[in-house]
């Protein structure tokens, strides 16, 4: 469905003045915002283990006058913050993410190296979610400042959303009611995937994402068969036949699902299937059957029907793998998200503000850092090393048209991100500001992965993203606070879309976040420093 973008009435003088106040606060506080970002970037804690990152946000928000619930919705590293000015006014929400990715430890430098005293296998910010969180925080605090200065009524909500890399938190916050009563949501992500660079999504939102853990338990190995050597006085002789055990079940599941991947769905629509083997209970090797083994599958599909087809195959494979290996099977959902709903009113209102702010611009220090990376890789430094698209805007409509050229006509959704759950609770806009990315050298192919990770930690290259995104959010929030017609039109569009395509929740209201699994974690050394395993690369 495509709705015509409504005409938005001219903003009153208060709107323009308040925007200037909010965005000037961001300009004046950029040194502090940059320091905050580097702190979260260095913490780099993975999904469900963002202890220090979440605590930092909670403490800062309380110091800024917000009422904060730590550990919201039974998630230890989540939070929900709220602040109001006066009576009435709209309720606006944005959020932070702060989880990093295991195995991507990179320093904020122009060469490949892990952060100081850390293993290359430690996590690092690849997207980077560190910039996502500080950008939205900048917009939030800039808006709060303008509301205080100009006496603008309204409520700001800010949620801490852990485990985005397994799309874990937003479905839980939604089920627990944390998005209820919100009038509008702004969802942001640093981005580089063309054409969605410095723009807002128009029609093609992210699709469904399912993630499930299959646990194989061999808790009665003695019942596998009679002793293979009846003359042995030892009931469990080392030479006796043993139950295949949990590892065999896991490998049967892994290999059969890999072999059958082409049979799950047709090879179109941009769907994908990923897996991860957990290490819980697998620290040593013995002659006994492995008692427990766990594998996580995550799949991205443009439609719920396609996602359910994959689910049926995986469930069937798991049942048979467990039976063959003399195991019991249990399953646990990690995430089960619905495709996103679009909102043209909010998308256009936000893009108008992005146009007013302008695309990121990279100064001499950023260019010098990019050129040094090219030298490190043996490339001739470019006068303009960053992708042209990183410093240019593209309208939501033009980005949509360019994206649709690569998608099947029937395909309504593309890629995945758990912001989609938010779009079912309130009018939501999803927008992107470019993260720094380098132009490819002719004939050289893609840059190594560490390059983009490093650019996400170097202040001169990542701060422009934070500045532009923060000011765009602040300007959009001021519009929504001072121009009630935008909120009304966005709600009307939201109600129409829900009525035309209702999609009930996919998990029960009491669904518990799966924080108990063997997600990558760290321990404390005697001196209090964090220790990641394996400690060094071999």
Image (cartoon, rainbow, N blue to C red):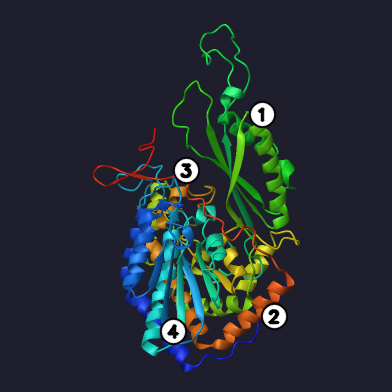
First reached walking from the N terminus: tag 2 or tag 1: 2
Marks 3 and 4, Cα distance to the nearest angstrom?
46 Å
Mark 3 = which residue? 518
Of 263 and 53, nearer the camera is 53
The quarter holding residue 344 reads: bottom right
Marks 2 and 1, Cα distance to the nearest angstrom?
57 Å
Left or right: 70 in relation to 300: left
- Decide: few, some or many residues near mark 1? Use Cα within 10 Å; few <14, some 14-19, many ≥20: some
Marks 4 and 2, Cα distance to the nearest angstrom?
27 Å
Marks 3 and 2, Cα distance to the nearest angstrom?
48 Å
What is the number of the mark on residue 324? 1
What is the number of the mark on residue 19? 4
First reached walking from the N terminus: tag 3 or tag 4: 4
**152 shown above or below 473:** below
Q: Residue drawn 72% across and 60% down?
A: 411
The quarter holding residue 28 reads: bottom left
- Decide: few, some or many residues near mark 3? Use Cα within 10 Å; few <14, some 14-19, many ≥20: few
The local secondary structure at tag 3 comes to: loop
* Quadrant where the image shows the C terminus: top left
Q: Residue drawn 55% across and 38% down?
A: 294
First reached walking from the N terminus: tag 3 or tag 1: 1
């Amino acid at each position: 469905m495509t709705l015509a973008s409504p005409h938005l009435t001219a903003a009153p003088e208060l709107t323009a003045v308040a925007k200037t106040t909010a965005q000037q606060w961001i300009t004046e506080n950029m040194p502090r915002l940059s320091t905050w970002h580097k702190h979260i970037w260095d913490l780099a804690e993975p999904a469900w283990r963002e202890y220090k990152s979440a605590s930092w946000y909670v403490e800062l928000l309380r110091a800024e006058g917000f009422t904060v619930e730590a550990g919201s919705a039974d998630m230890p590293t989540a939070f929900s913050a709220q602040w109001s000015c006066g009576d009435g006014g709209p309720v606006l929400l944005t959020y932070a993410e702060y989880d990093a990715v295991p195995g991507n430890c990179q320093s904020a430098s122009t060469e490949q190296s892990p952060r100081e005293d850390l293993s290359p296998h430690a996590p690092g910010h690849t997207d980077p979610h560190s910039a996502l969180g500080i950008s939205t925080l900048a917009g939030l605090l800039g808006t709060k400042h303008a509301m205080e200065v100009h006496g603008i009524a309204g409520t700001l909500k800010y949620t801490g959303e852990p485990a985005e890399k397994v799309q874990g938190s937003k479905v839980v916050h939604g089920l627990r009611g944390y998005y209820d009563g919100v009038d509008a949501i702004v969802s942001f992500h640093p981005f580089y995937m063309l054409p969605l660079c410095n723009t807002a999504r128009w029609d093609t939102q992210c699709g469904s994402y399912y993630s499930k853990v299959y646990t194989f338990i061999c808790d009665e190995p003695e019942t596998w068969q009679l002793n293979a050597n009846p003359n042995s006085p030892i009931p469990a002789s080392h030479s006796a036949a043993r139950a295949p055990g949990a590892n065999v079940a896991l490998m049967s599941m892994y290999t059969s699902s890999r072999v059958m991947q082409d049979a799950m769905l047709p090879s179109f629509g941009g769907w994908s299937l990923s897996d991860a083997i957990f290490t819980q209970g697998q620290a040593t090797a013995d002659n006994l059957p492995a008692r427990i083994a766990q594998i996580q599958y995550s799949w991205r599909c443009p439609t719920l029907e396609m996602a359910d087809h994959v689910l049926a195959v995986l469930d069937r494979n798991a049942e048979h793998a467990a039976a063959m290996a003399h195991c019991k099977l249990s399953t646990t959902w990690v995430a089960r998200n619905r495709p996103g709903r679009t909102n043209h009113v909010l998308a256009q209102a936000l893009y108008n503000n992005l146009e007013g702010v302008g695309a990121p611009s990279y100064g001499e220090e950023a260019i010098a850092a990019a050129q040094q990376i090219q030298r490190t890789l043996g490339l001739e430094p470019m006068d303009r090393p960053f992708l042209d698209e990183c410093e240019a805007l593209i309208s939501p409509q033009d980005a949509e048209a360019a994206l649709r050229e690569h998608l099947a006509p029937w395909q309504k959704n593309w890629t995945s991100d758990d912001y989609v759950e938010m779009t079912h609770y309130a009018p939501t806009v999803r927008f992107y500001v470019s993260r720094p990315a380098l132009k490819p050298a002719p004939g050289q192919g893609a840059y190594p992965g560490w390059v983009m990770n490093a650019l996400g930690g170097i202040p001169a290259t990542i701060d422009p993203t934070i500045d532009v995104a923060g000011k765009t959010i602040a300007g959009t929030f001021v519009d929504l606070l001072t121009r009630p017609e935008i909120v009304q039109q966005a709600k009307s569009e939201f109600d129409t879309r829900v009525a035309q395509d209702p999609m009930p929740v996919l998990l029960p209201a009491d669904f518990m976040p799966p924080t108990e699994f063997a997600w990558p974690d760290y321990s404390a050394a005697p001196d209090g420093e964090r220790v990641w395993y394996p400690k060094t690369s071999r």
